[in-house]
Image (cartoon, rainbow, N blue to C red):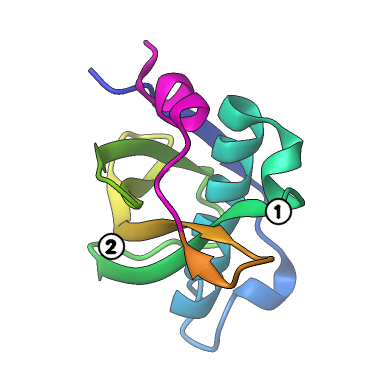
Amino acid sequence: MPRTIRTEIQKRFSDIDSFRHVNNVSQQMYFDVGKSDFFDRLLGPEILFAPVRIITAATDTSYMGQIRPEDRIAVTTCVERIGTKSLTLLQRIVADDGTVRSQSRSVMVAFDFEAQQSVPVPDAWRRALEAE
């Protein structure tokens, strides 16, 4: 079973649209908050500033239910797959009642910013992400 990190989300007034639910764009920002928390907790804060970092290459999101202003929500994040130069994250926005309101898969790439190219996923990352 992959390690899952749960990140509580605080909705902002500006996240609510004219239909009185959380806008899809805001939900993407929630997924980003979950990614940052996930990598910070498992790989450490240096992952955001080191020469080799993790970047998003692709996302695919499905919206299964509305998120209303009164809903308490969290983002769950886990690694589904680790490849040679990339990994796939599965994230879900889950309400307190356990229902999944949206789900996103993201392909994340190990990227060397000095060389401006993708690189193999570092062994230290692999060990930390595969640990249970």
Crowd tier of the residue under label 2, counting other residues whose Cα lies within 10 Å: few below 14, some 14–19, many 20 or above: few
Magenta-colored span: 119-132
- Left or right: 115, with 55 as reference point: right
Residue underneath mark 1: 51
Q: In the shown orientation, is residue 67 left or right of residue 35?
A: left
Residue 58 lies in magenta, yes or no? no
Give, as a three-letter code, the residue at label 1. Answer: Pro
Residue lying at 70% horizontally and 53% vertically, measured from the top left: 51
**Mark 1 Cα shell of 10 Å, populated few (<14), some (14-19), many (≥20):** some
Q: Which mark is residue 65?
A: 2
The quarter holding residue 98 reads top left
Say which quadrant the C terminus sits in: top left
> Disc 2 residue type?
Gly
Q: Relative to 30, is 57 on the left or the right?
A: left
x and y, in percent, of residue 116 in the image: 58, 73
SS at circle 1: loop
Q: Position of residue 125 (x, y in %)?
A: 49, 31
